[in-house]
Image (tube, rainbow, N blue to C red):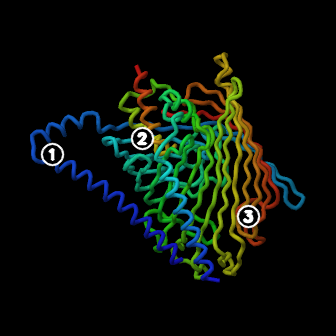
Amino acid sequence: MKTFKTSLKFIAFSFLCFTGITNTFAQDTLGNNASNPVGNLTNRTESKVGESHFMIVGLTTFGFVQQVTTNTYGGIKTKDNTNSITDADRFEFSPMFLWRHGDNMLLEFEPSFDGTSLGVNWADVSYFIAPGLIARGGYLVLPFGIYNKRLAAGWINKLASDPIGMDLPGSDFGVELEGGLPLGSMKWSYDVALSNGFQLNHDGTIQGVGATAIQNGKTVSGRVALLPLCNSSLEIGLSGLYGSLATPVGAIDSFKNPLVSMYAVDLDLIKYVGPLQFNIKGQYNISSISKQNYLDTGMNYYNFTNTTNAGFGQLSIRPALSNNKYLKNLEFAYRYVTYTSPSGSTWGQNYTESDFGIDYWLSWRTVVKCTYENVNFNNTSAAFSSSLPLGTSTINRFIIQFSTEF
Amino acid sequence: MKKYSINKKITIITICVIAFSGLFLFSCKESQKVAAKGGTQLWAENCQRCHNTPSPNTFSDEDWKTVGMHMQTRALLTNTERDKIVEFLQNINH
C-alpha cells in the first residue's frame, strides 16, 4: 500500500514537472518580446486571428423498441409485452462544445439528455505539451478498454444498444496523460489517469463519487495499446484500474479498506476482402472488490466473492467498395455479449445476449439501424433479496433506431 | 508474506517503468514506409478504425483543425498523422 502511495506521488510529481516545463518555455517566449512592446502587440494581434475557435458538434439517437419478456420460475411461466417510442434506454441528445485556443489547448464539454435526466459525459481541458504527450484535467472519460471512449456513440455503434457491463469505470474527476507514438512501422499509445475513484455501495456495487471523495484514496487507471500492422488496421489494448473505494454516507462499519481492481483486454481489426469490409471489435473486463461483509435488509451480515466479468465480441460486414450505390451503404452486424455478476449478491446473474443488426448508412455519419436482440439470463442472487426477476428470463427485442452526428 | 507482496509490487512497477522507458526511446523514429504516407492514406486508415471516413466537406478549414485535435485525444493519433490528415482535409475542402 505504501508502495502504491509512492507510485501515486511519482505520477503527480511527473505531471507537475511536465506542466512546469511548459509554463517555463511559454514565459521565455513572452520575455524575448518584452523589449519591443509595439511589435509584441502587433504579433499578438496577428497571431490571434483564427487561433481561438469555438464549434458545436454532437449526436442524437432515437428509435422504437418492441420487447417480449418471458420469465420462468417454479414451473410458472409469465410473459410481458412492451413497446416504446424514443425508448429511454437508447435515447440520447448530446451536443458537444469544442473550444480550441491556439495549437495547444482544447476544451471539450458534452452535456447529455438520455430521456430521463440531463447529465455530463465529459468536461475537460487538454494541453498538447509535445508530440505524443497530452495532459488533461477535469471531468474525463477514464482510460479503460476501447468501448466507452471510442465506440459508445450511437452513430459509431453498429448495433442499437450498448453491451451490458461496459459502462464502468465511465467518467470521473481527475488528471490524465496520454499520447500516440510511432514505433518503427508499428505504433503504440498510452493513456493513464489519476481520479477520485468509486464508492462501494451497501449491496457491493460501485458507483462514481463525483467531485468530493469521502476518503482520501484515489484511483489509477490506464490503457496501453499496440498497433502492430503498418496500416493501423489492428489494435490490441490492455487496461488496468486500481484504487481504494470510498464508503457511503452513514456507512456500515463492516467495510474494511475496500479496494477495487479491474483489468481489460480489447481488440479492433479492420480487414478488406474484395469489396467487403470486415470489422471485428471486442473487449473483456474483469472487476474485483476486496472481500467485505455486507448487511442485508434484516441487518444480518453476508458476504460473497465480488467479481464481475463482462465481455463482447462483434463482427460487422459492409460491402463498402461495391459499385452498387445502395449495396455499399448496407452493413450487417453480429454481437455476442456475456456478463456474470456475483452469485450470492442481490444482483447476481448469468447473462448472455446475441444481437443481429442490419444498418443502412444515409451518409458517413447518419445511420438507420434495425436490430434484433435475444437476451437470456438466470438469477443467481442471494435467497433473501434480489433486484432481478427470479428464475430464468428471456427477452426478445426488436429495435429501429436513427442516429446521427451533427 | 507481506514483504514478499511488497517486493512483488516493486518488481512489477520496475518492469513497467523499464518497459515504458524503452518504448519512449524507440518511439523517436518511424520507419521510412510509414513516414512516406500522405494525408489521404492516413485519413483512410485511421478514421475507419472507429467510424466511417468523414467527408472533407463536413467542416471548414478552421473546424477541421479543432476536430483534428479532438480526434487525436480519442484515437491517440501521432502528431504527424493528425497534421497530415488535417492538411489533406483542408486542401480538398472546397
Q: Earlier in the sequence, mark 3 or mark 1?
A: 1
Q: Quadrant of residue A44?
A: top left
In-front residue for pair B90/A300: B90
x, y percentage for residue A360?
Answer: 65, 27
Mark 3 crowdedness (10 Å alpha carbons): few <14, some 14-19, many ≥20: many
Q: Are marks 2 and 3 in contact (CB under 8 Å)?
A: no
Reading the image, the residue beneath label 1 is: A33
Quick check: A143 left or right of A346?
left
x, y percentage for residue B3?
Answer: 60, 82
SS assignment at label 3: loop
| Tag 1 subunit | A
In-front residue for pair A145/A28: A28
Reading the image, the residue beneath label 2 is: B69
In-front residue for pair A64/A327: A327
Q: Which mark is residue A348?
A: 3
Q: Residue at x 80, y 53 (%)?
A: A393
| Tag 2 subunit | B
Q: Are marks 1 and 2 in contact (CB under 8 Å)?
A: no
Q: Amino acid at mark 2?
A: Met
Q: Amino acid at mark 1?
A: Asn
Q: Amino acid at mark 3?
A: Gly
Residue B52 drawn above or below residue A286: above
SS assignment at label 2: helix
Q: Closer to the camera: disc 1 or disc 2?
A: 1
In-front residue for pair A101/A128: A128
User: Could one spot residue A80 in this view of the protein?
Assistant: no
Q: CA distance from mark 1 to mark 2?
A: 28 Å
